[in-house]
Amino acid sequence: MKILVVEDEIGILEGIVSLLKEEQYDVDSAQNGYDGLELANQNIYDAIILDIMLPEVDGFTILKTVRENGIKTPIILLTAKDRIEDRVKGLDLGAEDYLIKPFASPELLARIRVLIRGKGERNENVLSYGPIKVNEGDHDGYINEHKLNLTLKEYLLLEFFIRNNEQILLRDQIFNRIWGFSSESGLNVVDVYVHHLRKKLANYECDHFIKTIRGIGFMLKGDE
């Protein structure tokens, strides 16, 4: 599970990032609105924790922009203002929830769990598309009941495909989601792992589900 935190107060930012990492979430962060918007527009996150009062680009603008761009990632707004107008504005712009500073760590974690459940993608930790499944409990993939014996990166790749089935995923989008912005690997590592994953799916005649969009990226899609 990958989460973006956008917060300009360094103490709060470091506290949230540390808390989420302790809970085994994969976390990216930004300390200003410009960087936060750029990261949010990657559309590689499962949830975004977004402060309203940010330098360069405020949280409301980020929220409005990503929703206009068709990004449906659940967003929790952080605000130091307990004003009904701010809460209503955030919810009207497309935020799923808000927290008023200061807040307790268990409350933030509980609200993230609610967001994730609300996406309707989990069923006893299993995600599926057609005959292809991934089990978040054992970090492996299955074709019906046949285990694929995936490596961790192969599992993350297949999970990302299933979560975004029938959508084109750019190579750099996949790279940033699975390897991260600071990785020293080259972009061609995406093609290498797609090849490995296809070989394992081919054992059950399911490799055709991963479509290559020439010059752009890949898409998980069944035949019409």
Image (cartoon, rainbow, N blue to C red):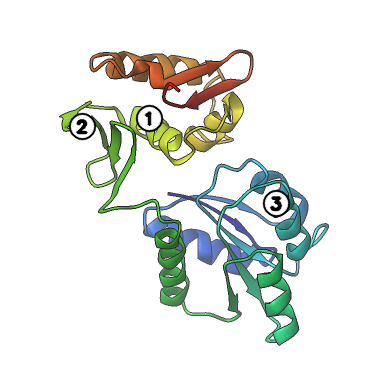
Mark 2 residue type:
Asn
Choose mark 1 or mark 2, whichever is in front.
2
Q: Nearer the viewer, residue 142 or 150?
A: 142
Crowding near pointer 2: few (<14 within 10 Å), some, many (20+)?
few
Query: Residue 176, percent across and down?
Result: 56, 34
Q: Nearer the viewer, residue 223 or 38?
A: 223
Give left or right: position of 169 versus 119.
right
Q: Quadrant of residue 182?
A: top right
For image coordinates 47% across by 79% down, the residue present is 104
Instruction: Give whichever of discs 3 and 1 has the lower sequence position.
Output: 3
In the rendered view, tell whether residue 125 sits above or below residue 12.
above
Choose mark 2 or mark 3, whichever is in front.
2
Residue for badge 3: 66
* Disc ID at residue 144: 2
In the rendered view, tell whether residue 209 sits above or below residue 100.
above
For image coordinates 57% across by 20% down, the residue present is 187
Q: Nearer the viewer, residue 144 or 43?
A: 144
Give left or right: position of 20 versus 65.
left
